[in-house]
Image: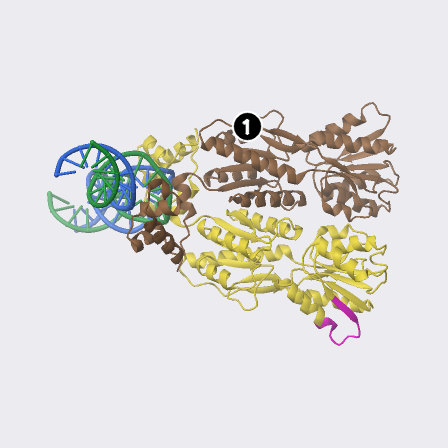
Chain colours: A yellow, B brown, C blue, D green
DNA sequence: TATTTTTGCGCAATCGTTTGAGCAAAGCTT
DNA sequence: AAGCTTTGCTCAAACGATTGCGCAAAAATA
């Protein structure tokens, strides 16, 4: 009954060889014409001794770990937490386990995590990359199926599933313009990341040729950044902008905080719009208009894509058609602008 | 340069035996009096062929995976997301990797995850248990070091690090009373969980003998629950309670939402207090008074405890003194009550 | 120079599985 | 009854590392 039982225990208890036991326990009984008698006896004893296969040994032998490496740049960021949760559950539903690593926006830690994934023989990797160049991940992608999510590289051979950040930012900006705002402050996040660059592009292209003042500030997807940029911009006590476009929900929170400090009412004194879905945004006062990313859909597509590649490679086929999808976000209008 | 190099590759490239290579690469060179020449040559070739040890094979042989299993009841809950992030990073700092599983408040999924951890040969487990009985986890705890966090069992031999939920709830309740509220609605979460039971106990004991009306409702740590209970309680259009005690931040959000629906102003019409730390609570209007849990401290203690047990067992000693700690939470006063 | 000690390393078993190949016994065919 | 098929299983070699034991050559000692 104790945890010491292995395939050998069962073999000697039943009088069959380890081969036979293995084949029964891995469901290959039919294929190898094991007698019903043997199947029953072996299964029964396996149950009795509470046999649990050693997944490590199995992995070593079969080169399949039924484990996926998930790499995010900050698990404590609610956005990535939600994303991770979604992915982990989708993987679990397929019988896969998740090794979770946090690169904390550091290329070095990302690299380490990837090496670790490799050493651990993960069957695939889902990553929100922080590196600025695709090389390393593409290199790994040759050995292990990799799908990028949320962030991607400009020209890459890796599959990805991201939000169409360009379209989203453009949509948000145009919404602000339509609302009649005349001077807009955009507060951005990690400037090297693709989502940020795309949002920036969406914003500036939407502003192009418009007789509207605007500025771009900031450099991190953090509350502090949101706060500090607003304070800095409004520091002289004036009201230089009548609208703020926060490139993430974390930035938005900082913004809200700063506005409150400045005794300005979001939605009334200053229009506010944000990126990122975050249920929280509805509980703020005013509830915040935002560009919502189809998180669930993205996770599902990423996981499905990953498994298609895994399957193809397992069958010795070449990779399926490259999936590089930008999912259009939706505008959720509330009362903040 | 390709990922195919193993210890054998290096052995033949250098002319040394695999034993020697292994000893050099695992830093046991001195101990086995390997010559400096051999050490240099082997290290150098290892670098050249970009050798990465196969962690699976290593685990099989050494019975140490340098992996910890982390089990939470809902990774998409910001509270657990933050907790996980904190733990993952602490583990990473010690060179350990994390297998993350989500039980989704289901005993069955919890059991599966634990079996998986065992099969994966994790060196230890940190768990927020959902089971109502300790048996299963205690059983596993005999094989693998286990530390509980956030939730624990009444009488258990397992170490745990939790918030002193009783004290926290009592503190919150007494604060409400001191503020002069006369009728309080407490909205609770998963009723079987220890934190909830303790919070409930703290609440009711604080109310004992007080000439104050109160009610207890709810059964989930969710936004919906918070919302629905408020609506239900206030449905006849009256204002039966002048204060609400939300047993978690998620519940609180639902509460806020419901109050808004009812056209009641939190903080003004109805006092509001919450459990759980969540930076978000400061951005609500009004910012919410709350019992803050020392998440960081708890994670650190849990991880430290786990490693002490791991170390002791590895050295063949018996487990260190049982750590069962309730960390007192702090009251963060804002303007919501 | 003969013996002992030290130095430096290799042999081979082992961890718990999976799996290709092979083989005896039973059944079937003619 | 000889030959062919099928049935039902076993043998033993992997997978990639670690490790107890042993042993030859060199160095030290006598």
Q: Residue furthest top?
A: B209
Looking at the rendering, which quadrant does residue A73 occupy?
bottom right
Disc 1 residue crowd, few under 14, some 14–19, many 20+, Cα 10 Å? few
In screen coordinates, is B242 left or right of A139? right
Q: Is residue A140 visible?
A: yes
Range drawn in magenta: A205-215
| Residue identified by numbered label 1 | B135
Residue under the image location 75 percent in, 55 percent down = A227
Instruction: Give coordinates of residue A23: x percent, y percent.
Output: 36, 42
Instruction: Give coordinates of residue A72: x percent, y percent.
Output: 58, 53
Is B123 rendered above or below residue A123? Answer: above
Instruction: Give coordinates of residue B276: x percent, y percent.
Output: 71, 39
Is B319 rendered above or below residue A166? Answer: above
In what element is the residue under mark 1? Answer: helix
State the quadrant of the C terminus of chain A. Answer: bottom right
Residue under the image location 30 percent in, 32 percent down = A15
């Amino acid at each position: 009954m104790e945890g010491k039982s292995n395939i050998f225990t069962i073999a000697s208890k039943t009088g069959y060889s380890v081969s036979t036991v293995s084949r029964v326990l891995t469901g290959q009984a039919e294929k190898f014409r094991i007698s019903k008698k043997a199947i029953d006896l072996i299964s029964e004893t396996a149950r009795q001794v509470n046999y649990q296969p050693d997944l490590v040994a199995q992995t070593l032998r079969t080169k399949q770990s039924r484990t996926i490496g998930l790499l995010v740049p900050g698990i404590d960021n609610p956005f990535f937490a939600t994303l991770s949760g979604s992915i982990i559950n989708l993987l679990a539903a397929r019988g896969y386990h998740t090794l979770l690593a946090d690169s904390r926006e550091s290329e070095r830690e990302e690299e380490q995590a990837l090496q670790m994934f490799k050493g651990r023989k993960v069957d695939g990797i889902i990553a929100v990359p922080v590196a600025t160049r695709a090389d390393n991940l593409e290199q790994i992608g040759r050995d292990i199926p990799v799908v990028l999510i949320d962030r991607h590289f400009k020209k890459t051979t890796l599959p990805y599933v991201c939000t169409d950040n360009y379209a989203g930012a453009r949509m948000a900006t145009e919404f602000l313009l339509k609302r009649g705002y005349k001077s807009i402050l955009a507060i951005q996040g990690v400037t090297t990341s693709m989502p940020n660059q795309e949002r920036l592009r969406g914003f500036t292209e939407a502003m192009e040729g418009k007789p509207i003042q605007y500025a771009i500030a900031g450099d991190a997807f953090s509350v502090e950044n949101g706060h500090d940029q607003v304070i800095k911009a409004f520091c002289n006590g004036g009201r230089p902008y009548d609208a703020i476009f926060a490139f993430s929900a974390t930035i938005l929170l900082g913004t809200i905080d700063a506005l409150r400090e400045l005794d300005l009412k979001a939605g009334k004194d200053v229009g506010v719009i944000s990126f990122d879905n975050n249920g929280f945004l509805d509980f703020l006062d005013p509830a915040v208009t935002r560009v919502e990313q189809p998180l669930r859909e993205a996770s599902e597509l990423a996981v499905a894509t990953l498994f298609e590649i895994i399957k193809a490679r397992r069958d010795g086929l070449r990779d399926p058609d490259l999936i590089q999808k930008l999912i259009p976000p939706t505008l959720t209008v509330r009362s903040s602008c």
